[in-house]
């Protein structure tokens, strides 16, 4: 899903009662979904037939079902069953207890006026004065318009969708279009989908659509139809916009694995919402810019084929889809510059000091679909991981994740993704995931550097965290060194604050640039130049201004020194006694307030006073 601000303003946070509560004692196998709708009327009449396997012995089954729709009858082997409905839970009483492993089925007949919570799970509107209706069930809205099991742990293996609607319209849905059968004044449109699918990804849309197709050609030799259902008044310009879809589908298939539903189709159905929604094999689109086409298409791999196992981990859907937008730009596709895209994403993420990728409060749709955190930060955390483990381990890890038989057509957690990256990289990524997925905020760096006449290069890395949930971001940080017409990028394994690195550089360094290729989520770094302590100089301070720890170098011959810190009024505010190795030491000044201070170094051989600033 890709949302725009207009939609986010209208969202009402959901209470926990809106989340799925269907029973866990059965496993869905197949659904036959029959809907009767008129896009001019907000009403639905339907029948859902569930084929399932009993997991634990039971004499009841429960389903998620919203307050706006009500049961007409429930048929089980030709007989009617009793049911009760409490809040959003429909409980069906079976005639006898079923044992584990039993294959069974029942049909629920219902009708009513769906209550459209959140993003508008069942909407009736108009376009160009023509009626249109559509569904959008993510995250908890499937139950608003059909009795279902909308938990993120059980996908039916396949579905058939039958939509009865006025004959002047067309109906879009998941899978392959099998037939459009005229019965009186109505058309019955049949879509067949033979892949596992989460409840929130099942969708229908009905209006006076015009249709056309593009085709993608995969390296495997397969051809994929891209079927578009577009408002007649929009076809002339949208057809040109959707023409980019084949190259994006081909690119993702080459970069990851073949399009997962290549034996059916991909498609777009226009609807009147201010974003896009990745309904499996047919995304519903409110607009058709390059980024949103790429985003919703990427979801077919990340979100549909493999779905997040909890809304806490929505970044596995949205972070991946957002990063796939960027991958298009990196590879010369689309309408944006790759490096500009990265800079925009980093600026967005760091525009506020807090926020984790992991969603703590999944009762609030605003938080689940937070553009800065679930989308942009999720995308840039993937980019950061790529920078830390390298392209080969990163993309091989993603392909292994997509090929994992436990995850294919099923659900995944953050730990599942992490395990694949650890396997391909050979690295323990627990700390990185703790900091960047579960922790909040980001680092800001100050780099202090100098180079001696013998070409030895010294770098001090100071890191400040924007949020207290992370005490330090351990990272390999890329730093570009330039001068004498040469440049090199060096990775420094930064594991502690105010860490000093020394290496030999065979040219005269004139410029130091932090993270030139934008791998790290951080605010722009401060670069401080300091030279070696000359014989004529007594002391050198770095960085100056200081934010945390002050590095001090002297050319004093003594073995120990005492240090006092005075404020601008001459009041002593800090004291350090018997400091060993006065040639190089550091002082913890994080408790000092901002302002101008003086450091006094007392040694047997000399007494030195120098001014510095505290940020």
Image (cartoon, helix red, strand yellow):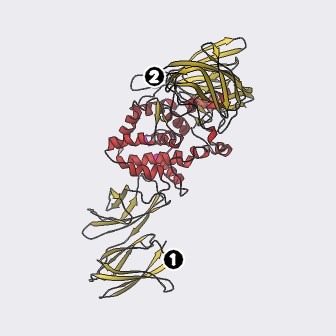
Number of numbered tags placed on the structure image:
2
Helix, strand or loop at disc 1? Answer: strand
Quadrant, the N terminus: top right
Point out residue 45 in the picture as x, y percentages from the top left corner.
69, 22
Quarter of the view holding residue 526: bottom left
Point out residue 243 in the picture as x, y percentages from the top left corner.
53, 30
Camera-nearest residue between 472 and 595: 472
Q: Main secondary structure of the magenta part?
A: loop
Is 32 situated above or below 403? above
Say whether residue 449 is left or right of residue 57: left
Helix, strand or loop at disc 2? Answer: strand
Ranked by sequence position, the earlier of labels 2 and 1 is 2
Q: Alpha-carbon neighbours of circle 2 within 10 Å: few (<14), some, or many (≥20)? A: some
Q: Which mark is residue 424?
A: none
Q: Which residue is at a point 47% across and 50% down the rendered structure image?
A: 438
Question: In the rendered structure, which segment of residues is drawn in magenta?
Answer: 330-339
Can residue 218 be seen at all in this image of the molecule? yes
The question of residue 331 being in magenta is answered with yes
Quarter of the view holding residue 506: bottom left
Disc 1 designates what residue? 595
Point out residue 205 in the picture as x, y percentages from the top left corner.
64, 26
Which mark's residue is nearer the viewer, 2 or 1?
1
CB of mark 2 within 8 Å of CB of mark 1?
no
Disc 2 designates what residue? 223
How far is the residue under mark 2 from the one under mark 1?
Answer: 67 Å
Say whether residue 196 is left or right of residue 385: right
Is 541 situated above or below 146? below
Is 109 situated above or below 477? above
Can residue 32 be seen at all in this image of the molecule? no
Point out residue 225 in the picture as x, y percentages from the top left corner.
51, 23
């Amino acid at each position: 899903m890709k949302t725009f601000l207009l939609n986010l303003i209208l969202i009402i946070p959901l209470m926990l009662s809106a989340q799925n509560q269907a029973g866990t004692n059965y496993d869905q196998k197949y659904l036959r979904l029959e809907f009767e709708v008129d896009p001019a009327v907000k009403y639905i009449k339907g029948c859902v037939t569930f084929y399932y396997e009993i997991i634990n012995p039971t004499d009841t089954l429960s389903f998620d079902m919203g307050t706006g729709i009500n049961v007409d009858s429930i048929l089980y082997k030709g007989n009617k069953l009793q049911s009760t409905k409490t809040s959003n839970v429909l409980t069906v009483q079976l005639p006898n207890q079923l044992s584990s492993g039993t294959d069974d089925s029942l049909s629920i007949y219902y009708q009513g006026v769906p209550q459209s919570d959140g993003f508008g799970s069942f909407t009736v509107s108009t376009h160009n004065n023509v009626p249109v209706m559509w569904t959008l069930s993510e995250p908890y809205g499937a139950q608003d318009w059909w009795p279902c099991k909308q938990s993120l742990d059980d996908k039916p293996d396949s579905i058939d969708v039958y939509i009865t609607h006025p004959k002047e319209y067309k109906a879009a849905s998941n899978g392959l279009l099998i037939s459009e059968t005229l019965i009186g004044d109505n058309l019955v449109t049949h879509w067949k989908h033979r892949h596992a699918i989460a409840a929130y990804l099942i969708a229908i849309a009905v209006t006076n659509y015009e249709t056309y197709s593009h085709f993608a050609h995969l390296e495997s030799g397969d051809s994929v139809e891209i079927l578009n259902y577009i408002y007649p008044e929009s076809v002339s310009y949208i057809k040109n916009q959707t023409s980019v879809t084949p190259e994006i589908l081909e690119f993702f298939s080459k970069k990851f694995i073949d399009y997962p539903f290549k034996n059916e189709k991909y498609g777009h159905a226009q609807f009147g919402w201010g974003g896009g929604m990745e309904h499996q094999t047919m995304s519903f689109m409110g607009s058709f810019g390059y980024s949103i086409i790429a985003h919703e298409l990427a979801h077919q791999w990340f979100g549909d084929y493999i779905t997040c196992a909890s809304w806490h981990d929505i970044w596995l859907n949205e972070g991946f889809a957002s990063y796939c937008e960027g991958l298009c730009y990196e590879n010369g596709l689309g309408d944006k510059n790759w490096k500009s895209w990265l800079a925009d994403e980093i600026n967005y993420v760091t525009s506020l000091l807090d926020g984790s990728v992991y969603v703590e409060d999944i009762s609030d749709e605003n938080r689940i679909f937070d553009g800065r955190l679930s989308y942009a930060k999720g995308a840039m955390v993937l980019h950061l991981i790529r920078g830390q483990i390298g392209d080969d381990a990163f993309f091989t890890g993603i392909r292994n994740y997509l090929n994992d038989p436990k995850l294919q057509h099923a659900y995944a957690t953050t730990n599942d993704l992490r395990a694949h990256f650890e396997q391909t990289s050979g690295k323990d990524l627990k700390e990185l995931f703790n900091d960047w997925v579960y922790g909040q905020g980001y680092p800001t760096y100050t780099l202090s550097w100098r180079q001696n006449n013998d070409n030895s290069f010294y770098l001090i890395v100071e890191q400040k965290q924007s949020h207290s949930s992370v005490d330090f971001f351990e990272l390999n940080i890329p730093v570009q060194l330039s001068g004498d017409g040469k440049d090199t990028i060096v990775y420094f394994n930064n594991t502690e604050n105010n860490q000093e690195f020394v290496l030999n550089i065979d040219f005269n360094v004139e410029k130091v640039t932090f993270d030139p290729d934008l791998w790290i989520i951080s605010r722009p770094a401060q670069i401080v130049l300091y030279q070696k302590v000359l014989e004529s100089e007594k002391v050198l301070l770095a960085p100056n201004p200081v934010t945390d720890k002050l590095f001090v170098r002297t050319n004093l011959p003594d073995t120990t020194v005492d240090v006092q810190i005075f404020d601008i009024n001459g009041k002593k505010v800090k004291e350090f006694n018997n400091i060993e190795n006065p040639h190089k030491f550091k002082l913890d000044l994080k408790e000092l307030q901002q302002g101008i201070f003086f450091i006094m170094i007392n040694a047997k051989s000399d007494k030195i006073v120098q001014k510095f600033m505290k940020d």
